[in-house]
Image (cartoon, grey):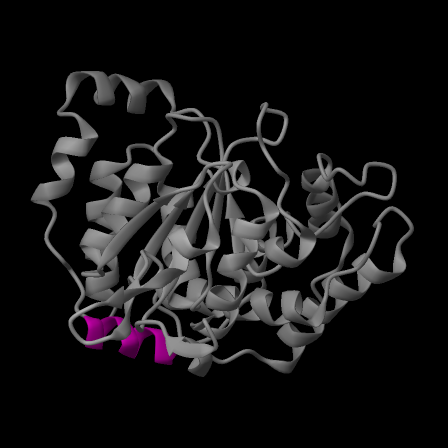
Amino acid sequence: MLKPLEDCLQTLNRVVLGKEPQIRLALTCLLARGHLLIEDLPGMGKTTLSQALARVLGLSYQRIQFTSDLLPGDILGTSVFNRDTSAFVFHPGPIFAELVLADEINRATPKSQSALLEAMEEGQVTIEGATRPLPQPFFVIATQNPVSQSGTFALPESQLDRFLMRLSLGYPAHAAEKALLQGQARRELLPQLDAVLDHSALAALQQEVPRIRASDALLEYILRLVEATRSHAQFAWGLSPRATLALLAAARAWALLAGRDYVIPEDVQAVLPAVVGHRLRERADPAGHAAGSLVQWLLREVPVL
């Protein structure tokens, strides 16, 4: 079962150069049935990574470009009157795909951003009073530019909490950027990618994640991390039970990617920055720019045993 996952990682690493940790975290997020938020400057490879993931995992793909005039109906779909049948016919929107890229999500108004909420949490959408299930698997990758850029609307906490992880790709290393200059354009490589996993193999891997063993001592470590955010003064607020469950699910998926059927503390530490960084705020800095230092404090101060 591990061989297809290794093949996925190798294929993705050939397309997105020098970003092995972020690619491993993105695949971990999908295996844990979570949604991914990538926050970075334009041109860093966010869109390329999402397209490569869809191709390698054999998922149908739709891209939604969020803008200030985007309406919820543009995302979910709408009913159009058919004169021949004298009835309304529903035309599904781009949300009805297995992997949806919500590009530059913080450029849309809060009303359009909230159209994703039910879809991400429930795997279904309610349109004109009718509830319609979304395809399975269903995975949202949202990208956003830093909030300091003009024309952006910060995602509300309720929306941020629905993303299992937040990643930043960052600038490539010198060797990776040189390979980028010497090699083929990344977008030209995408059509050449073949699906490594089919739907049944991906579903089997996702079902395997909850079966990864987590000892009582490991659960206590996760609880100590969470309780530290709730009891220490530098945290504006503590992690929610949803965040606790997300941390365990991500650690299990990371262990599966490493070829183990049990979780170790290093798995929790590997996924902790991506899982809790966007959920924490420093009391002195409620805008959230110092969340990274809070995560490092947790890793340093909370004992494993």
Position of 202 relative to 48 (above/below):
below
Say if 164 sits above or below 18 in the image.
Answer: below
Does any portion of residue 157 appear in the rendered image?
A: yes
User: Nearest the camera: 112 or 285?
Assistant: 112
**Where residue 90 sits in the image (x, y, percent)?**
29, 69
Bounds of the magenta segment? 199-208
| Location of residue 86 in the rendering, given as x and y in whole percent from the top left corner | 24, 75
| Left or right relative to 234: residue 64 | left
Q: Which residue is painted at 22% across and 37% down in the image? A: 15
Tell me which corner region of the image, top left, top right, bottom left or bottom right, holds residue 259: bottom left
Residue drawn at (87%, 37%) of the image: 284
Quarter of the figure with the N terminus: bottom left
Q: Left or right: where does residue 262 sit relative to residue 266?
A: left
Secondary structure mainly formed by the magenta segment: helix
Q: Quadrant of residue 7?
A: bottom left
Task: Please say whether residue 258 is visible from this viewpoint.
Answer: no
Q: Is residue 210 magenta?
A: no
> Residue at left 19%, top 54%?
56
Q: Position of residue 167 (x, y in %)?
A: 50, 44
Q: Position of residue 5 (x, y in %)?
A: 25, 61
189 sits left or right of 282 in the view: left
Q: Residue furthest right?
A: 233
